[in-house]
Image (cartoon, rainbow, N blue to C red):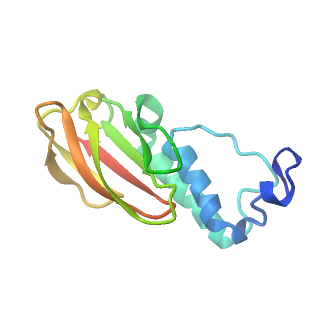
Amino acid sequence: SSDLHGGGAAATIEPLREHLPHYEARFANLIGYGVQACFRGPRLYDSEETKAIVKKWVSFYKQHRDVLDNGEIIHLRRPSGRDWDGILHTNPLGKEQGMLCIYNPLNEEMTRSIRVPMHYTGLRGNCRVSIDGNEPTAMEIDGTQHMTLLLKIPAQGRSYVVFQK
């Protein structure tokens, strides 16, 4: 077991298979923020369940690499631990022009109306919107270059929205 800066049991999530929600949250946060991390240590997984988490988030990264790596990041709300926080990745010239990543730090599901500044995506009028990997639907960008989305964000979870032409 490895601990962070000698912090003992409170600073480790070993064995990984016994801390699946925490382990997945770390992957989701790093990848959702576009962090190109170098993972070090004796292993990335210690069971089929933890291996599945690694595969899930590596696949997510590969699928959305263009917008995660090549665009700008707009911080929509800074993390406070008391309500949602989120960022908008933008890449007007990419295959995905935007990706909204919203995080819920609370122990209860939340539903929030989130105003997204679409100007930075380069999209105008209508665009295709996919929430959490679901089939894209056409939605309108308003005259102020914003789109308002009503999102349900799971407790201690996240929601991802992809914007395309």
Quarter of the rendering containing residue 136: bottom left
**Residue at the spot x=21%, y=41% of the render?**
147
Q: Is residue 95 above or below residue 4?
A: above
112 sits to left or right of 3: left
Residue 41 screen position, x and y as percent: 80, 50
Residue 14 screen position, x and y as percent: 78, 63
**Residue at the spot x=63%, y=71% of the render?**
49
User: Split into 4 quadrants, where in the image is the N terminus?
Assistant: bottom right
46 sits to left or right of 165: right
Looking at the image, which is closer to me, 3 or 67? Answer: 3
Q: Is residue 31 above or below residue 154?
A: above
Furthest-front residue in this view: 82
Q: Is residue 82 above or below residue 98?
A: below
25 sits to left or right of 91: right
Quarter of the rendering containing residue 2: bottom right
Residue 82 screen position, x and y as percent: 49, 51
12 sits to left or right of 29: right
**Residue at the spot x=84%, y=60% of the render?**
9
Looking at the image, which is closer to me, 12 or 134? Answer: 12
Q: Is residue 165 visible?
A: no
Quarter of the rendering containing residue 53: bottom right
User: Split into 4 quadrants, where in the image is the C terminus?
Assistant: top left
Q: Is residue 130 visible?
A: yes
Residue 73 screen position, x and y as percent: 43, 31
